[in-house]
């Protein structure tokens, strides 16, 4: 079932000294319920602008975006759209608003007018899903970066969205924090059926998705399964993008004469092929 549909989407803004600039052009995109879509691209390619179009933080200059059949162009739909498409930003400190973890997770449902007993259930469920139940009474500001981001995700999950939009949520985290957050995102998609739109500049994170979109100058230039997209080394390099480290190593080994398939992307796959 289709949950996001963009047709002829374009977005233009005014930039000082540059006049009007198109951040997005001719975006035609359909995303089904339950998909896990990673969005990558060079800086300024329109990734964050696209994310903000999905939950109506920005609305189209031209074309249309529908979220669960609701047009983002209609201000009367914005409240319902933001209930259905929860957004997690790069810096969790910008989303944590309460003193304790459980109070912060309860903030969204309270603003939706959810009954108190239901809020308690939602908070407990959301914290369990992100592995933060033991921290519910802790001061939110004393948590690590990875823990704060998990709390931010729990706050969105407590509002029961159909879609989770993450705008570089691991950019400020250390490797352990990134790994924790990616495990949570993958589990929410796989076990809860939540649609995930994950904007990232870490190519290894994009491998966790079922589909990768590559943006450049506001347009979608590649769209496919991660293994298909990351085999297009030359095109990605021309955009200033890397490929996953293992894919880069496989390319070098093939050039040195090793008989390896080009779609090997993970360490485990590479070890298995080399040992066989």
Image (cartoon, rainbow, N blue to C red):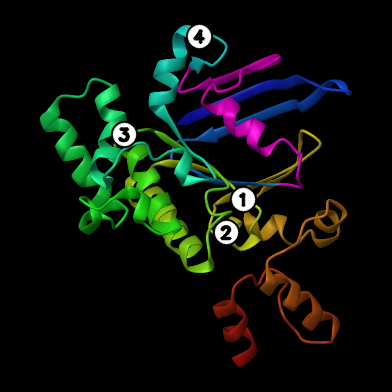
How far apart in space, not on screen, are marks 2 and 4 (Cα)?
Answer: 34 Å
Badge 4 is on which residue? Answer: 75
Q: Residue at x 22, y 46 (%)?
A: 125
| Residue 112 against residue 193 in the figure, above or below | above
The residue at the point 29 percent across, 37 percent down is: 158
Residue identified by numbered label 3: 160
Q: Is residue 161 left or right of residue 241?
A: left
Please tell me whether mark 3 sits on a helix, a strand or a loop. loop
State which tag comes first along the sequence, 2 or 4: 4
Badge 4 crowding class, 10 Å Cα cut-off, few under 14, some 14 to 19, many 20 or more, is few
Q: Which mark is residue 205?
A: 2
Q: Residues within 10 Å of mark 2 (few under 14, many from 20)?
A: some
Q: x, y percentage for residue 154?
A: 33, 44
The residue range painted magenta reads 41-69
In 3D space, how far apart are the residues under numbered discs 3 and 2 (Cα atoms)?
A: 24 Å
Q: CA distance from mark 2 to mark 1?
A: 7 Å
* Residue that carries the numbered disc 1 in the rendered image: 200
């Amino acid at each position: 079932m289709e949950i996001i549909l963009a047709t002829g989407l374009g977005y233009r803004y005014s930039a000082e000294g540059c006049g009007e600039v198109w951040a997005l052009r001719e975006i035609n995109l359909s995303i089904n319920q339950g998909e896990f879509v990673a969005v990558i691209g060079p800086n300024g390619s329109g990734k964050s602008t696209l994310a903000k179009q999905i939950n109506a933080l920005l609305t189209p200059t031209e074309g249309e975006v529908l979220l669960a059949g609701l047009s983002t162009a209609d201000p009367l739909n914005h409240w319902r759209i933001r209930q259905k498409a929860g957004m997690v930003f790069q810096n969790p400190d910008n989303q944590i608003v309460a003193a304790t973890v459980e109070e912060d997770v309860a903030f969204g449902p309270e603003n939706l007018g959810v009954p108190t007993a239901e809020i308690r259930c939602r908070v407990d469920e959301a914290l369990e899903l992100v592995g933060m139940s033991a921290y519910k009474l802790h001061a939110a500001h004393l948590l690590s970066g990875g823990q704060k981001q998990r709390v931010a995700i729990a706050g969105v999950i407590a509002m029961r969205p159909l879609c989770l939009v993450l705008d570089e949520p691991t950019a400020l985290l250390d490797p352990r924090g990134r790994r924790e957050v990616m495990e949570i995102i993958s589990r929410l998609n796989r076990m809860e059926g939540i649609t995930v739109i994950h904007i990232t500049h870490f190519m290894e994170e994009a491998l966790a998705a079922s589909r990768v979109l590559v943006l450049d100058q506001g347009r979608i230039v590649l769209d496919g399964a991660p293994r298909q997209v990351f085999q297009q080394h030359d095109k990605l390099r021309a955009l200033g993008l890397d490929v996953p480290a293992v894919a880069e190593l496989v390319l070098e080994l093939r050039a040195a004469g090793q008989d390896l398939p080009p779609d090997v992307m993970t360490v485990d796959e590479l070890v298995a092929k080399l040992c066989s």
